Image (spheres, rainbow, N blue to C red):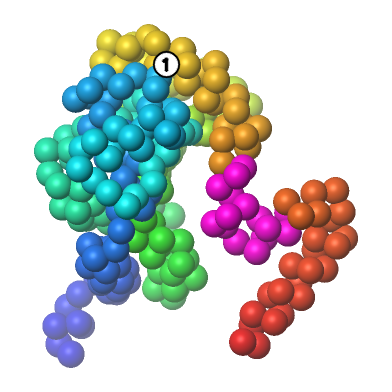
């Protein structure tokens, strides 16, 4: 008990989150590669076979992955950016299972690092900190089990935000530009900067994105970026890329959404009934 008395109170919260995350990482080691396989094999094929824009066609992508000797998985690189493959390339020097463990471990460490800095900058009650992994238990578990990138994205956005608040715009632009080329949707940050009339920060972020985009053009090539920007990104925005998959593997929410696209009343009523039934089961 004396040991616990010498540990700062919030540190116990971080330890609690770290323990839960570690359990998930251990479980994920025995789980299928899932989403992580898209990033891993995408990086491997883009760099070792120069697959190019063909990587966005699932039938070609899966044939190439099968040719590597990997069986019984389905991969789809869309709607990921070509830049994402550059970040994941170092992991391809390991087996897919070991790479997933390494990536999950790095994600957990970076998540805890940024979370601690955020709590230090904006004090949070210990109860909220402890409740965090419980409230977001399923999303956190899925992130590790599937090898997803959301904790890494949290790190990039949080560190960029903390730098932005200190007006360290160079540092801010480095983190946020990686996030934008990594997942695209953080491009909304440009709108936030304009709305707040932070023109200097806007210019820094624009230049950082331009530099990273130029580097990615040199590494990944012009063809794949042109195809991504003119074909993949517009189709992804319209939901055309994942529409057929979404109806098969997503939640009851998505099933009802596609079943009653123009009848909000019926959709809401059936979803409410489903949640009530699920609660008592």
Of 13 and 248, the residue lying toward us = 248
x and y, in percent, of residue 267 in the image: 80, 60
x and y, in percent, of residue 76 in the image: 42, 39
Q: Quadrant of residue 130?
A: bottom left
Q: Quadrant of the N terminus?
A: bottom left
Whether residue 68 is visible here, answered yes or no, is yes
Q: Main secondary structure of the magenta part?
A: helix
Whether residue 163 is visible here, answered yes or no, is no
Of 223 and 199, the residue lying toward us = 223
**Relative horizontal placement of residue 21, taking residue 140 as reference (left or right):** left
> Badge 1, how many Cα within 10 Å: few under 14, some, many 20+?
many
Secondary element under disc 1, as helix, strand or loop, is: helix
Q: Residue at x 73, y 51 (%)?
A: 258
Give above or below for 154 relative to 128: above
Count up the numbered dots.
Answer: 1
Q: Residue at x 47, y 21 (%)?
A: 228
**Relative horizontal placement of residue 33, taking residue 207 as reference (left or right):** left
Of 235 and 24, the residue lying toward us = 235
Q: Which residue is mark 1?
A: 225
x and y, in percent, of residue 264 in the image: 84, 55
**Stretch of the chain drawn in magenta:** 243-257
**Relative horizontal placement of residue 246, taking residue 114 as reference (left or right):** right
x and y, in percent, of residue 118 in the image: 38, 52
Q: Quadrant of residue 171?
A: top left
Q: Is residue 227 rendered magenta in the image?
A: no
Give above or below for 155 relative to 237: below
**Relative horizontal placement of residue 44, taking residue 144 as reference (left or right):** left
Of 221 and 6, the residue lying toward us = 221
Q: Residue at x 48, y 33 (%)?
A: 79
């Amino acid at each position: 008990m004396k040991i616990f008395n010498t540990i700062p109170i919030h540190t116990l919260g971080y330890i609690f989150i770290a323990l839960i995350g570690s359990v998930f990482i251990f479980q994920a080691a025995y789980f299928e590669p899932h989403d992580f396989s898209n990033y891993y094999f995408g990086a491997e094929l883009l760099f070792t076979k120069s697959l190019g824009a063909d990587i966005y066609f699932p039938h070609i992508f899966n044939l190439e992955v099968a040719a590597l000797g990997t069986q019984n998985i389905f991969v789809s690189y869309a709607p990921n950016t070509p830049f994402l493959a550059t970040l994941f390339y170092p992991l391809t020097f390991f087996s897919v299972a070991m790479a997933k463990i390494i990536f999950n471990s790095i994600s957990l460490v970076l998540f805890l690092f940024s979370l601690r800095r955020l709590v230090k900058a904006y004090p949070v009650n210990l109860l909220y900190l402890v409740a965090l992994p419980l409230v977001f238990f399923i999303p956190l578990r899925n992130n590790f089990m599937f090898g997803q990138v959301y904790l890494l994205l949290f790190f990039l956005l949080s560190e960029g935000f903390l730098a932005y608040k200190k007006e360290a715009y160079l540092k801010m632009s480095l983190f946020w530009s990686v996030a934008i080329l990594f997942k695209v949707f953080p491009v909304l940050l440009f709108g936030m900067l304009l709305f707040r009339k932070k023109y200097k920060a806007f210019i820094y972020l624009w230049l950082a994105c331009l530099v990273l985009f130029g580097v990615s053009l040199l590494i990944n090539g012009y063809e794949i970026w042109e195809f991504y920007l003119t074909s993949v990104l517009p189709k992804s925005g319209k939901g055309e890329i994942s529409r057929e998959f979404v109806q098969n593997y997503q939640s009851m929410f998505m099933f009802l959404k596609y079943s009653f696209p123009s009848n909000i009343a019926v959709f809401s009523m059936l979803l409410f009934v489903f949640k009530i039934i699920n609660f008592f089961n």
